[in-house]
């Protein structure tokens, strides 16, 4: 068999189209990415709210370190951000 005959036989085979372009889809949809960025924003806000409360003078105690914002609100925001991230990863994208 000559090389020209083999090439023509290969060219005559029917080409199979990819199934609904499933190979070219991303793992996450637009809504998943939107939820991920919202979750990252909530986590960043929680860490920003936790900052501060120190004293310039080491001999002076500052009670601002133990307020509601730093002890309760900021950690809850961080946990809520992580929950949003888990939901964003687990949510099935729409077709």
Image (cartoon, grey):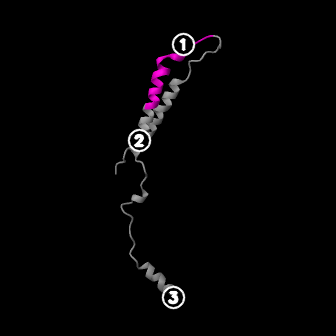
Pointer 3 local density, CA inside 10 Å: few below 14, some 14–19, many at least 20: few
Residue farthest to the left, as pictured = 95
Is residue 65 shown left or right of residue 21? right
Residue at 42 percent across and 40 percent down: it is 86
Residues at discs 2 and 3 in contact (Cβ within 8 Å)? no
Pointer 2 local density, CA inside 10 Å: few below 14, some 14–19, many at least 20: many
Q: Is residue 88 magenta?
A: no
| Sequence-earlier tag: 2 or 1 | 1
Name the residue that disc number 1 marks. 63
Percent from the top left, x then y, of residue 74? 48, 25
Q: CA distance from mark 1 to mark 3?
A: 90 Å
Magenta range is 60-79
Label the magenta part by its dominant secondary structure.
Answer: helix
Residue at 48 percent across and 28 percent down: it is 46
Name the residue that disc number 3 marks. 2
| Sequence-earlier tag: 1 or 3 | 3
Q: Nearer the viewer, residue 3 or 87?
A: 87
Is residue 87 shown left or right of residue 59? left
Of helix, strand and loop, which one carries label 2?
Answer: helix
Residue 88: image tag? 2
């Amino acid at each position: 068999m000559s090389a020209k005959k083999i090439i023509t036989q290969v060219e005559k085979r029917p080409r199979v189209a990819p199934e609904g372009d499933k190979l070219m889809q991303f793992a996450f949809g637009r809504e998943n990415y939107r939820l991920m960025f919202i979750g990252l924003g909530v986590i960043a806000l929680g860490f920003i709210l936790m900052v501060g409360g120190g004293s310039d003078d080491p001999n002076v105690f500052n009670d601002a370190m133990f307020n509601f914002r730093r002890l309760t609100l900021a950690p809850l925001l961080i946990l809520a951000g992580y929950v949003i991230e888990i939901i964003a990863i687990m949510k099935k994208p729409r077709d």
